[in-house]
């Protein structure tokens, strides 16, 4: 089979690149490993995108200029991996919503209790699944060929050029250009285990089991340059009772800043109020990954119950902390001591108004670790709790790219006709931190770049 551009993958970055290449006049074939009902990878579970904008509109409550988004990105984790590529991402996020609308995206107002994102992020009407469905309908009208259940098993390189793409069913495709948009390797627990050891067995994978890093492995074996931290990933706290794979956004636990978090030993281990929740919620997957057994427990009381999206599987509830600890299988004495110490640390600070709209300065005193914001006593029954595990969304280790999304080679050159977008190259931009909605930003910005440049290469 001959085609201008082959896109490997089926999520947001893949379909955006396919649409862009088709807009440029290229013949496009998209190979999605999943069946049609599960197409879309992690993008199925998304709700919003974070883009810079100078004014509010019908779907955002105010301005979010370039400088503020750049500061936010630099303020999470260790900051951007490559500041030049990260700045390009932020700058080109400005016109992403208009492009999305032109290709089928519809929008809705932000829901309450969703990380205070109404000003900074735009929400998809119906969520990520609906967005993808709209994109695929647009792609069909644009003449993009889509094949499901099509796993790419090999990228054959002749020097710096990919000449053949082999598919599991035995077909060989001869593309003019290839766009790799097949996600990270978060579903490959053996690969994660190289960096995390036995802890990897305790991780949950929020997206599909298909994201095993096969295409990434092909690129690295062919001499692609690595980008991103080996242990880096976007991971949040998810309900420990959720499925091992593909639980999606519904299994995320939003209770953390409203109460306290203890580990399997009944002790706090991190500041639950470190910063405004959209900037810090993704740090909790890594925090829990470093705890004994990769388990932690969020505890809160009746004062805040119902102030956030409820846990999908309900809560453990009790009239006393001792009874709650017993339900969780934790040491009653350790948990009651932890709560008592926390309450005493709250009492040492003059009270201030409690609000989740912004960091409120309600901090503890004389407590290690502290709680820097939203600290109030746990003293009103019934008490509630949920068990949590690390829920990995995607990994940051990927391939290095140029400003044109070409895949770099470890020898200092580039692959002439191989491009990358989305999670497989997110390590160029993200190091250890994450901003809510920014994965969709990366996929949309770099999908457009990869699609445009692949079509330009193919059409000569």
Image (cartoon, helix red, strand yellow):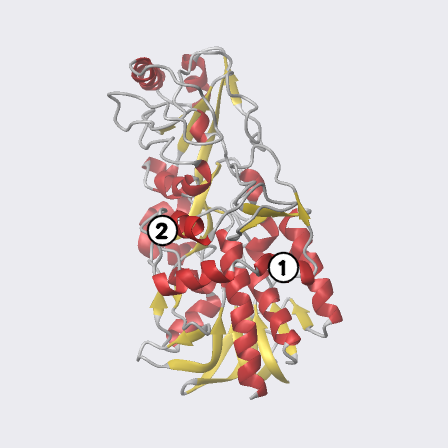
Other residues around mark 2 within 10 Å, as few (<14) / some (14–19) / many (≥20): some
Q: Nearer the viewer, mark 2 or mark 1?
A: 1
Residue 398 coordinates in the image, percent (x, y): 40, 64
The circle on residue 98 is 1
- Look at 61% across and 65% down and name the residue there: 15
Above or below 225: residue 206: above
| SS for callout 2 | helix
The circle on residue 74 is 2
Above or below 73: residue 399: below
Q: Nearer the viewer, residue 346 or 352?
A: 352
Say if residue 183 shows up in the picture. no
Report how many numbered discs are placed on residues in the image.
2
Q: Nearer the viewer, residue 423 or 392?
A: 423
What distance separates the C-alpha of mark 2 from that of mark 1?
25 Å
Other residues around mark 1 within 10 Å, as few (<14) / some (14–19) / many (≥20): few
Whichever of callouts 2 and 1 sits on the residue coming sooner in the sequence is 2
Q: Residue furthest front?
A: 55
Quarter-wise, where is residue 400 in the image? Answer: bottom left
Q: Please state if 253 lies on the left or on the right of 342 as rendered.
A: right
């Amino acid at each position: 089979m001959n085609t201008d551009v082959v896109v490997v993958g089926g999520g947001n970055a893949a379909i955006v690149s396919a649409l862009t290449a088709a807009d440029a006049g290229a013949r496009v074939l998209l190979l999605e490993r999943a069946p049609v009902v599960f197409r879309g990878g992690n993008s199925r579970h998304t709700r919003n995108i974070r883009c810079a904008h100078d004014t509010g509109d019908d779907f955002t409550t105010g301005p979010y200029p370039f400088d503020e988004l750049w500061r936010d990105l630099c303020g999470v984790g260790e900051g951007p991996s490559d500041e030049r590529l990260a700045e390009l991402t932020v700058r080109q996020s400005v016109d992403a919503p208009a492009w999305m609308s032109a290709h089928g995206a519809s929008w809705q107002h932000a829901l309450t209790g969703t990380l205070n994102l109404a000003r900074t992020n735009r929400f998809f009407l119906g969520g990520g699944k609906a967005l993808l469905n709209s994109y695929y309908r647009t792609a069909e009208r644009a003449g993009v060929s889509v094949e499901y259940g099509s796993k790419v098993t090999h990228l054959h390189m002749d020097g710096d050029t990919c000449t053949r793409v082999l598919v599991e069913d035995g077909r060989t495709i001869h593309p003019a250009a290839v766009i790799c948009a097949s996600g990270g390797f978060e579903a490959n627990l053996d690969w994660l285990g190289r960096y995390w050891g036995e802890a990897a067995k305790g991780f949950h994978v929020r997206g599909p089991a298909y994201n095993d890093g096969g295409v990434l492995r092909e690129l690295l074996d062919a001499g692609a340059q690595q980008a991103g931290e080996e242990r880096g990933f976007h991971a949040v706290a998810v309900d420990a009772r959720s499925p091992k794979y593909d639980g999606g956004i519904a299994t995320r636990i939003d209770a953390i800043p409203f109460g306290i978090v203890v580990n399997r030993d009944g002790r706090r281990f991190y500041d639950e109020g470190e910063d405004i929740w959209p900037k810090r919620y993704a740090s909790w997957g890594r925090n829990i990954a470093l705890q004994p057994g990769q388990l932690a427990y969020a505890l809160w009381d009746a004062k805040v119950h119902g102030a956030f999206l409820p846990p999908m599987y309900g809560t453990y509830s009790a009239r006393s902390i001792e009874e709650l600890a017993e339900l969780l299988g934790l040491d009653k004495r350790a948990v009651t001591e932890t709560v008592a110490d926390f309450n005493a640390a709250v009492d040492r600070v003059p009270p201030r108004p409690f609000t989740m709209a912004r960091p409120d300065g309600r901090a503890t005193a004389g407590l290690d670790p502290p709680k820097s914001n939203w600290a109030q006593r746990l003293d009103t029954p019934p008490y509630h709790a949920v068990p949590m595990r690390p829920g990995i969304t995607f990994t940051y280790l990927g391939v290095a790219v140029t400003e044109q999304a070409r895949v770099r080679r470890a020898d200092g050159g580039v692959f002439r006709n191989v491009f990358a977008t989305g999670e497989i190259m997110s390590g160029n931009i993200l190091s250890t931190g994450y901003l809510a909605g920014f994965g969709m930003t990366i996929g949309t910005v770099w999908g457009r770049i990869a699609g445009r440049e692949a079509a330009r290469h193919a059409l000569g």
